[in-house]
Amino acid sequence: MSNPTTSFFEGLGRRGHEALLEEATGTIRFDLTHEQGIDRWVLAIERGDFRVSRDEGEADCVVHSSRAAFDRIVSGQSQIYSAWVRNELRTEGDVRLARLVQRLMPGPPEAHHPRDFVRERRRAA
């Protein structure tokens, strides 16, 4: 059965490149705890190109969270910065990488992409 976190990382793996991360290079490991243990996801970024894996090992940045809190973030129900403030999410290592990943997180479910909003306004006018 799929969950929001799995869907999020699988979707990233299919994209393979993100222009918003072209200034980034490094690895981020996400350690997400739940009742059965820890899910680990690794995002390796090389100037906007990225690869997603389930490898364990060293990373430039490690993000610790519960899977439930991360599910809320990747579903757009919570913001990553709010989770840091509430201590639902902690980071070790190169925090700059974790801050850049915020660019990949979805907005709230009712949010519209700015370009779509402008197109809709132009059609209505």
Image: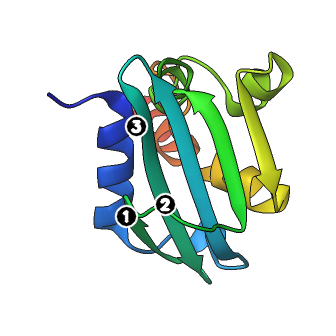
- Name the residue: 82% across, 59% down: 93
Secondary element type, mark 1:
strand
Circle 3 is placed at which residue position?
123
Residue 124: name its quadrant. top left
In this rendered view, identify the residue nearer to me: 116 or 32: 32
Residue 58: name its quadrant. bottom right
Sooner in the amino-acid sequence: mark 3 or mark 2: 2
Q: Is residue 7 above or below residue 34?
A: below
CB atoms of marks 1 and 2 within 8 Å: yes
Image position of 46 (left or right of 110): right
Q: Position of residue 36 (x, y in %)?
A: 35, 23
- Name the residue: 57% across, 75% down: 45
The three-letter code of the residue at mark 3 reads: Arg
Circle 1 is placed at which residue position?
53
In the rendered image, the quadrant that contains the N terminus is: top left
- Name the residue: 72% across, 68% down: 60
Q: Label 1 neighbourhood size at 10 Å, few (<14), some (14-19), many (20+)?
A: some
The three-letter code of the residue at mark 1 reads: Ser
Q: CA distance from mark 3 to mark 1?
A: 42 Å
Q: Nearer the viewer, mark 3 or mark 2?
A: 2
Image position of 9 (left or right of 67): left
CB atoms of marks 3 and 1 within 8 Å: no
Q: Is residue 51 above or below residue 79?
A: below
Circle 2 is placed at which residue position?
42
Q: Position of residue 74 (x, y in %)?
A: 48, 33
The three-letter code of the residue at mark 2 reads: Val
Q: CA distance from mark 3 to mark 2?
A: 42 Å
Q: Position of residue 43 (x, y in %)?
A: 51, 63
Q: Position of residue 13 (x, y in %)?
A: 34, 63
Q: Is residue 34 visible?
A: yes
